[in-house]
Structures are given as C-alpha cells and as structure tokens.
Amino acid sequence: MTLKEVPRYYCDYCDAYLTHDSPSVRKQHNAGYKHKANVRNYYMQFEEQTTLSFIDKKLSSFDGSAFTAYQHEISRVLKEQIERRSSDIL
C-alpha cells in the first residue's frame, strides 16, 4: 500500500512550502505580515538597482556644486519615495 503525497504550495517569495494546497491556506499565507514583507523586499531590490544605475548616469554628467546640489536632491526624493511605498504596502 502506497501513500499519496499531499500536494503542497511553494511560495517563491518566502522560500517555503505550505502544508496544504487549498485556496484558504494560500489566502491566509498571502495576507500574512512576513509574506508581505518578503514580497516588498523582493521588488525593492530591483527598484534599488534601477535607481542606482539611473543616479550613476546622471551624476556622471555633473561636476562641482551642481553635482553636490543634485546629489542632495536625489537623496531627498529617494527617501520620500521609499517611505511612501513602505507605508502603502503595510
């Protein structure tokens, strides 16, 4: 007599298997704080990479005081965007 294996759901963001593959288990998992944080962190890494490459391209075209002013402005805008997105997700 062989036992059938219970299908399990794998969450790529959390790198974890859920014990059962039912809509209610998936819904509960996806509504959880840790899952939402993992999803946010996953997409933030791409945003950070894109933003940094954009900043590097722009900064290479500036020099002197214009460079410093632009650098401060970019830092301020990035901080505002990160804070806004973090509060939107939670």
Image (cartoon, helix red, strand yellow):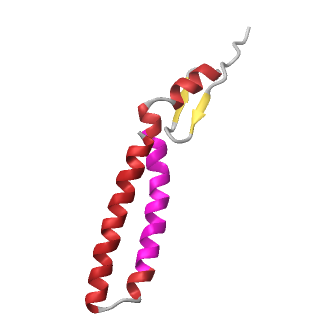
Compared to residue 4, the image places residue 89 above or below, namely below
Compared to residue 63, the image places residue 50 above or below, namely above
Compared to residue 24, the image places residue 69 above or below, namely below
- Left or right side of 44 for 26: right
Residue found 56% across the figure and 21% down from its top:
19
Residue 29 screen position, x and y as percent: 52, 27
Residue found 56% across the figure and 41% down from its top:
12
> Foreground: 69 or 16?
69
Residue found 38% across the figure and 83% down from its top:
59
Most distant residue in the bottom direction: 63
Magenta segment includes 52: yes
Residue 47 screen position, x and y as percent: 47, 60
Residue 30 screen position, x and y as percent: 53, 31
Residue 37 placement: quadrant: top left
Magenta segment includes 17: no
- Left or right side of 61 for 13: right
User: In what quadrant of the picture does the N terminus appear?
Assistant: top right
The secondary structure that dominates the magenta segment is helix
Label count reads: 0
User: In what quadrant of the picture does the C terminus appear?
Assistant: top left
> Foreground: 11 or 74?
74
- Magenta segment, which residues? 37-56
Residue 26 screen position, x and y as percent: 58, 26
Compared to residue 68, the image places residue 84 above or below, namely above
Residue found 52% across the figure and 41% down from its top:
13
Most distant residue in the right direction: 1
- Left or right side of 83 for 65: left
Residue 24 placement: quadrant: top right
